[in-house]
Image: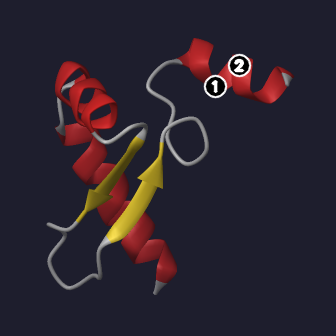
């Protein structure tokens, strides 16, 4: 179900280097599409809404 998909996405993101993720989000204007999780459909992620690359980013988003 959804919890399995979330866990697979979490593992995927944690396996990526922070610099590579930042670059992918910059290239995609703050968005990326993850297509490589076997057995799950592609998922669109938006930086600052679905994903935070630092605790500071998360804090800033929750203050506004």
- In screen coordinates, is 17 left or right of 46? left
Q: Is the residue 53 above or below the residue 49 in the image?
A: above
- Tell me if mark 1 has few (under 14), some (14-19) or many (20+) residues whose alpha carbon lies within 10 angstroms of its own: some
Image position, residue 54 (x, y; %): 49, 19
Q: Distance between the residues labelled 2 and 1?
A: 4 Å
Image position, residue 41 (x, y; %): 29, 82
What residue is rendered at 23% in x and 51% in y? 12
Assign a secondary structure to mark 2: helix
Q: Are marks 2 and 1 in contact (CB under 8 Å)?
A: yes
What residue is rendered at 14% in x and 77% in y? 38
- In screen coordinates, is 12 left or right of 62? left
What residue is rendered at 27% in x and 82% in y? 40
In the picture, which quadrant includes the C terminus?
A: top right
Tell me the quarter of the picture where residue 28 sits: top left
Specify the label residue 27 is tagged with.
Answer: none
Assign a secondary structure to mark 1: helix
- The residue tagged 2 is 59
Q: Is the residue 28 above or below the residue 22 in the image?
A: below
- The residue tagged 1 is 58
What residue is rendered at 61% in x and 44% in y? 49
- Tell me if mark 2 has few (under 14), some (14-19) or many (20+) residues whose alpha carbon lies within 10 angstroms of its own: few
């Amino acid at each position: 179900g959804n919890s399995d998909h979330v866990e697979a996405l979490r593992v995927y993101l944690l396996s990526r280097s922070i610099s590579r993720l930042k670059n992918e989000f910059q290239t995609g204007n703050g968005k990326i599409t993850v297509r490589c999780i076997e057995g799950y459909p592609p998922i669109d992620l938006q930086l600052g809404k679905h994903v935070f690359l630092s605790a500071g980013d998360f804090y800033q988003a929750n203050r506004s």
